[in-house]
Image: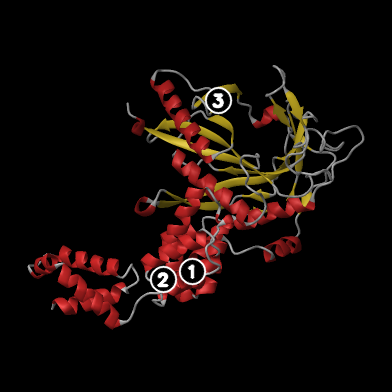
Amino acid sequence: MSRTDWEVVIGLEVHAQLNTASKIFSGASTAFGAEPNVQASAVDIALPGVLPVLNRGAVERAIRFGLAIGAHVAEKSVFARKNYFYPDLPKGYQISQMDLPVVQGGAITIRVGEAEQAYEKTVRLTRAHLEEDAGKSLHEDFHGMTGIDLNRAGTPLLEIVSEPDMRSSAEAVAYARSLHALVRWIDICDGNMQEGSFRCDANVSVRRKGATEFGTRREIKNLNSFRFLQQAIDFEVQWQIDTLEDGGRVQQATVLFDPDSGETRMMRSKEDAHDYRYFPDPDLLPLVVSPDWKARVQAGMPELPGAMKARFMDEWGLSAYDATTLTASKEVADFYQATVTAAGTALAKPCANWIMGDLAARLNKAELDIAASPVSAAQLAGLVTRIADNTISNAIGKKVFEALWNGEGASADEVIDKQGLKQVTDSGAIEAMIDEVLAANQKSVDEFRAGKEKAFNALVGQVMKASKGKASPAQVNELLKKKLG
């Protein structure tokens, strides 16, 4: 039986560390990289007599997320104690939310695939709730032992839980990328996956095509890269299908992904909610989000990616593909808007082409984010403007771009002047070059007159070569056609 006889069902639980300066229930720092255990306060490790105090900034970030996904932001939500033992959980319980989370419902529209093969899909969210992070177990450099660093204990998390709406690893990665972009866009999480600020758990099951009941799911824990997320899901799906087709049974479990082997392996049998013995935290009052508080957060929200995409299409004439690409991250969107502001909205499309083309290629090659681009938005706008007003050709524009990238001029105008790149538009000068080329290339002239169109392109190329790329291509074409009759 082939894999096409099975349907994959995936839901993601994403943990986004909120970018507050202090922890969710204490004043201890959340800064990454400190020496082990220097940022674990008495509250974080629940020493006798201490009481948690809720961080208002963490709540506001949760509200911001709820508004961004069109969810219901609960006027009243409750914190609970989730009881379990693990060495890096100093309290023996985690303060989280269960029955009454602060964010309920909502949805995210994702784009899956590339160009013409791409499609859009809406993934529903079940909830997003506030909780505290645990510490971290350190397994290296301890000579067979495990060290415990409690600096992370108490760091505020927003756990974002999706419905099981995804049907492939590609959809899961597209969803995770969209969510990653969104939490950075609305400035609630730095999204640094290497530091654990954004990490995913994937709930994966398979069922026969046409079945209505879900299969038994296995949860892949702590995936901290989109590549690992895809690899882990693909391996797990194939493992479950092979197990079932061989007559075996999938047992509900928590599994880990080993990037070295590309395989998942069972860590423990999966617990259900009742195993954690949730009960309301007696030290924390219910969280009340008043309409006024919600309205104040709403007033401070940035323009969201969907609205910006629609504006780029409606006002600036971009295609859906271009608008989606340019709103994939806030940094790219900000750079694009700054470029168009400097160049003028009439040049919105060529600005988009340069950012998605030459600039993106150079950034990828140099492994740089757009925020670190050596070519600024203002410089790129100047370049696009000079191509548009025929000061230089598009081909010469690429030379100017390289010069700007290498720091050989403060602006496109400076590079053009220094290197003498201004386009030749004098008809007499271009005609003289054409006459020389025609005299030296009689064979191409004869071939063109015999009906070979390629011969015309060859002659254009010779004229452009003679002008060192500086002749206006449009004028070369026009004058050459006249000369050839």
Residue in front for this viewpoint, 250 or 441: 441
| Lower sequence index among marks 3 and 2 | 3
Q: Nearer the viewer, mark 3 or mark 1?
A: 1
Residue in front for this viewpoint, 404 or 256: 404
| Lower sequence index among marks 3 and 1 | 3
Residue 225, above or below 340: above
Q: Which residue position holds label 1?
A: 415
- Name the kind of residue labelled 2 in the image: Leu
Give the residue furthest to the right: 49
- Name the kind of residue labelled 1 in the image: Val
Q: Residue at point 54% right, 73% down?
A: 342
Disc 1 from disc 2: Cα separation: 8 Å
Q: Which residue position holds label 3?
A: 252
Disc 3 from disc 1: Cα separation: 64 Å
- Name the kind of residue labelled 3 in the image: Gln
Proximity of marks 1 and 2: CB atoms separated by less than 8 Å: yes
Disc 3 from disc 2: Cα separation: 67 Å
Q: Residue at point 51% right, 46% down?
A: 175
Q: Position of residue 468 (x, y in %)?
A: 33, 67
Q: Which residue position holds label 2?
A: 421
Q: Residue at point 65% right, 49% down?
A: 190
